[in-house]
């Protein structure tokens, strides 16, 4: 069995990653999935979360929001709405987004779309966590 597989992460704007990876962890709709070379084929919906992959013995991190992943024994393809490297994340903007989402969730107003506010909060927290890996 091979020690690596081809990993491609693509957004509507660009190809973010094209590399040989030793493993990847992806945010599936119902929890994180760990993928190693030779994994059984599957297709899964993705949620907001952190993608971590290992290439050349070092870990790389991306903030990902929604999409799909196709897993084959020798290739993983991720089609994502957004995928950001730590250096691409505007930390101030992510902090403000987190604060706005927390305010919406705690202000007591009944017209707040709670699911949307929770999504915004989770996305902001993920972006902040991934940005911390770039330091």
Image (cartoon, rainbow, N blue to C red):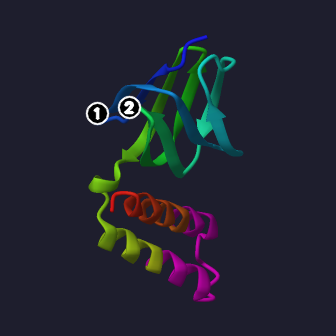
Q: Is residue 109 magenta?
A: yes
Q: Where residue 50 appears, x then y in whole percent?
A: 51, 50
Image position of 3 with respect to 46: above or below:
above
In space, the residues marked 1 and 2 are separated at their CA atoms by 6 Å
Q: Where on the picture, by quarter, is residue 83? A: top left
> In the current view of this chain or complex, which residue is farthest to the top?
1
- Residues at discs 1 and 2 in contact (Cβ within 8 Å): yes
Mark 1 Cα shell of 10 Å, populated few (<14), some (14-19), many (≥20): few
Image position of 83 with respect to 130: above or below:
above
Q: Where residue 120 appears, x then y in whole percent?
A: 50, 65
Q: Which mark is residue 74?
A: none
Where disc 1 sits, the SS reads loop
Q: Which part of the image, by quadrant, shows the N terminus? A: top right
Where disc 2 sits, the SS reads strand
Image position of 39 with respect to 113: above or below:
above
Q: Which residue is mark 2?
A: 10
Q: Which residue is mark 1?
A: 14
- The stretch in magenta equals 100-120
Residue in the image at 54% along x and 51% along y: 48
């Amino acid at each position: 069995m091979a020690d690596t597989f081809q990993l491609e992460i693509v957004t509507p704007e660009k190809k973010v990653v094209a590399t040989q990876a030793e493993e990847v962890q992806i945010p599936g709709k119902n929890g994180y999935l760990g993928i190693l070379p030779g994994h059984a084929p599957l297709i899964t919906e993705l949620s907001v979360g952190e993608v971590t992959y290992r290439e050349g013995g070092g870990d790389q991190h991306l903030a990902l929001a929604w999409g799909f992943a196709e897993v084959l024994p020798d290739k993983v393809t991720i089609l994502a709405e957004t995928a950001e490297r730590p250096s691409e994340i505007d930390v101030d903007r992510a902090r403000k987004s987190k604060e706005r989402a927390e305010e919406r969730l705690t202000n007591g107003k009944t017209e707040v779309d709670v699911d949307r506010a929770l999504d915004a909060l989770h996305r902001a927290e993920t972006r902040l966590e991934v940005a911390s890996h770039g330091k």
